[in-house]
Amino acid sequence: MVDLMLRQISRRAEQIAAADAIMAGVRGGEIATVSDAEAEILLSAQTALAGWRKVRGLTQAALAAEAGISQNYLSDLERGKRSGTTDVLGRLARVLRVRVDDLIDE
């Protein structure tokens, strides 16, 4: 019984430490947060790429120009018709100020 309680206390301490690390990242700016309105945009968008573009207030034309790709190519990416190269996703992520992982739908 004591062993079980000690394991539970240890697990809880690990959870608290993980939560503290996340909060420190948010406070330090390493972990971004989104507002409820932005979360709704991201959740309702056809793809993560389309959602982040809308959250950042960019048109397809503006994002495509900044990333050095055609608007048609961006449109295909946003509709999931094409997957995009690592290079293109990296450029889009830079313009959108997100991680490449944030643009990949699972």
Image (spheres, rainbow, N blue to C red):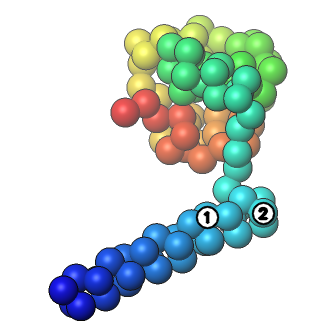
| Percent position of residue 86, x then y | 48, 41
Q: Which label is found at residue 27?
A: 2
Left or right placement of residue 28 versus residue 80 in this view: right
Q: Quadrant of the N terminus?
A: bottom left
Amino acid type, residue under disc 2 in the picture: Arg
Q: How many marks?
A: 2
Instruction: Return the residue nearer the eye: 65 or 96.
Output: 96
Q: Is mark 2 on a helix, strand or loop?
A: helix
Residue at the bottom extreme, as displayed = 2
Residue occupying image coordinates x 78% and y 66%: 28
Residue 67, relative to residue 18: is it above or below? above
Instruction: Return the residue nearer the eye: 93 or 86.
Output: 93
Quarter occupied by residue 4: bottom left
Q: Residues within 10 Å of mark 2 (few under 14, many from 20)?
A: few
Residue contact between numbered discs 1 and 2, judged by CB atoms under 8 Å: no
| Percent position of residue 24, x then y | 70, 69
Q: Which label is found at residue 22?
A: 1
Amino acid type, residue under disc 1 in the picture: Ile
Left or right placement of residue 82 versus residue 37 in this view: left
| Percent position of residue 20, x then y | 62, 71
Quarter occupied by residue 93: top right
| Percent position of residue 66, x then y | 77, 29
Left or right placement of residue 61 versus residue 85 in this view: right
Does residue 4 appear anywhere in the picture? yes
Q: Residues within 10 Å of mark 1 (few under 14, many from 20)?
A: some
